Image: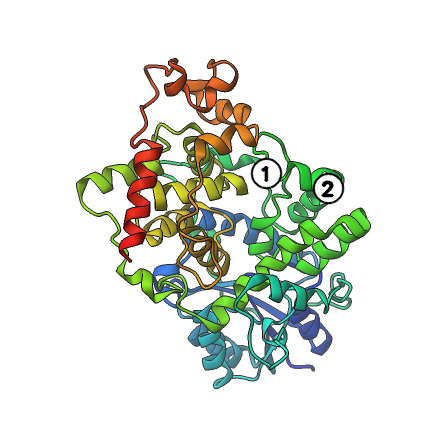
Amino acid sequence: MTDPVLVWFRQDLRLADQPALAAAAAAGPVIAVYVLDDAAPGAWAIGGAQRWWLHHSLTSLAADLHAHGVPLILRRGDAVTTIAALAKETGAAAVHAVHHYEPWWKAAEAALAEAVTLTLHPGMLLDDPDRVRTGSGGRYRMFTPFWKALRQRMPPPEPTGVPRGLTGASVTIASDRLADWALLPTQPDWSTGFDEWTPGEVGAHARLRAFTGRIAAYEQDRNRPAVEGTSRLSPHLHHGEISPAAVWHAVAAAKAGDAEPYLREVGWRDFTSNVIDILPDYADANGREIYDRMPWRTGKAAEADFRAWTGGQTGYPIVDAGMRQLWVTGWMHNRVRMIAASFVVKHLLIDWRRAEAWYWDCLFDADYGNNSVNWQWIAGTGIDSNPFGRIMAPLTQSPKFDAGDYIRAWVPELADVPGDAVHDPEEAGCRPNGYPAKIVGHREARERALQAVKAV
């Protein structure tokens, strides 16, 4: 009899174009395992919204594997110890996994390789960022040259389907019950607005098909929060329910030579993984050390402002709409993410790391690389970032990107404010009693931010 082969699932929860699963299926009967390890990432253990998504994604993956006679084994605890013990318990000849770039997963992979025969495969990104090198052999730290170099290596290989001959090992293995992990919120259940999402591989491909049908308008509509202009594939890509190669080829086929704006966004995922691969503490440390001296606001007033920001009560309609959309749906439109992020860092002068942690807890797609690089870009503290002195003006951005209907949808207090007054009802003299006044004036905030950065 052929010895079983173990597949370690993490943020690669799919059957199609899953190279670790394909390699294991070719070698023998498969044992599929997912380990919920909250200790390894420390402060970066997945947040509340991601736990909801993970519950449903694992449910979907288990059903897909079951159709091929492969049970999904669930364990909770230290991933290295658990996988090594499971390999010994089952007599597995080898362990296959998709390589991850988060520092805790890289450490776990190195430790596990000391205990078992571990084979790591690509599959998280379009290409291994360690292979995207400068002419002198160095690593890129700026996106534009990185993208140009990555683009020369594209397209990625054609995506593959579900492995043929996928079968499960004929051994009985103890598994946790998913319900016992208590990933779903109950008291209270704040996930009622998540119903628009369908976690899992089937939901990911449905979302991709819907997007390719309207991609012709992507470049025009992606910055308009009131329309369905973006792909909304980010949670599926983050959890690995669809491969970036599959997305690349579907988009390129649908849009031919005009797909570049969206493909560039897919390439951004590779760049952010490249950054954390060379700077693993990027979520906690300023990319530019000079900003270690930044006089961020603290104290009661700053805390009150931060609470107002998280609750969508700043008096800036587009900021409040975005923060409420985030809380209700686990997702926020990309343009509004930038506006809301700039607001808390520059208008409120609050350390970007505090806000980064809030996004991490609330977003389905809170990827360690994307989250940290994006926050440092908007805060001006990163190795490749928007200068701190470029301060987004939310009251200008809102009408520029036609956000009126978006605001009315997410800030019901403003639903009846007519026309362009909805972008700044206070200035227009029609702010409803139930909607707060601005917690800080734009000019006042801008001047405070510029004085702070001048001091550094």
Q: Quadrant of the N terminus?
A: bottom right
- Label 2 crowd bin: few (<14), some (14–19), many (20+), radius 10 Å: many
Q: What is the number of the mark on residue 232?
A: none
> What residue is at 30 percent from the left and 32 percent from the top?
440
**Where residue 224 sits in the image (x, y, percent)?**
59, 34
Q: What SS does tag 1 mark?
A: loop
> What residue is at 76 percent from the left and 61 percent from the top?
161
Q: What SS does tag 2 mark?
A: helix
Quadrant of residue 353 within the rendered picture: bottom left
Residue 13 visible in the displayed image: no
> What residue is at 42 percent from the left and 56 percent from the top?
376
**Where residue 285 sits in the image (x, y, percent)?**
35, 64
- Label 1 crowd bin: few (<14), some (14–19), many (20+), radius 10 Å: many
Q: How far separated are the C-alphas under marks 2 and 1?
A: 13 Å
Relative placement, left or right, of 323 versus 142 is left
Query: Residue under circle 1?
Result: 223
* Above or below: residue 395 compared with residue 344: above
Mark in the foreground, 2 or 1 = 1
Q: Residue furthest left?
A: 300
Which of the two residues, 291 or 125, is positioned nearer the viewer here? 291
Looking at the image, how many numbered discs can be counted on the residues? 2
Q: Are marks 2 and 1 in contact (CB under 8 Å)?
A: no
Q: Quadrant of the C terminus?
A: bottom left
* Above or below: residue 352 compared with residue 331: below
* Above or below: residue 256 compared with residue 225: below
Residue 122 visible in the displayed image: yes
> What residue is at 35 percent from the left and 27 percent from the top?
315
Amino acid on which disc 1 is placed: Asn
**Where residue 352 sits in the image (x, y, percent)?**
35, 52
**Where residue 57 sits in the image (x, y, percent)?**
56, 51
Amino acid on which disc 2 is placed: Ile
Query: Residue under circle 2?
Result: 215
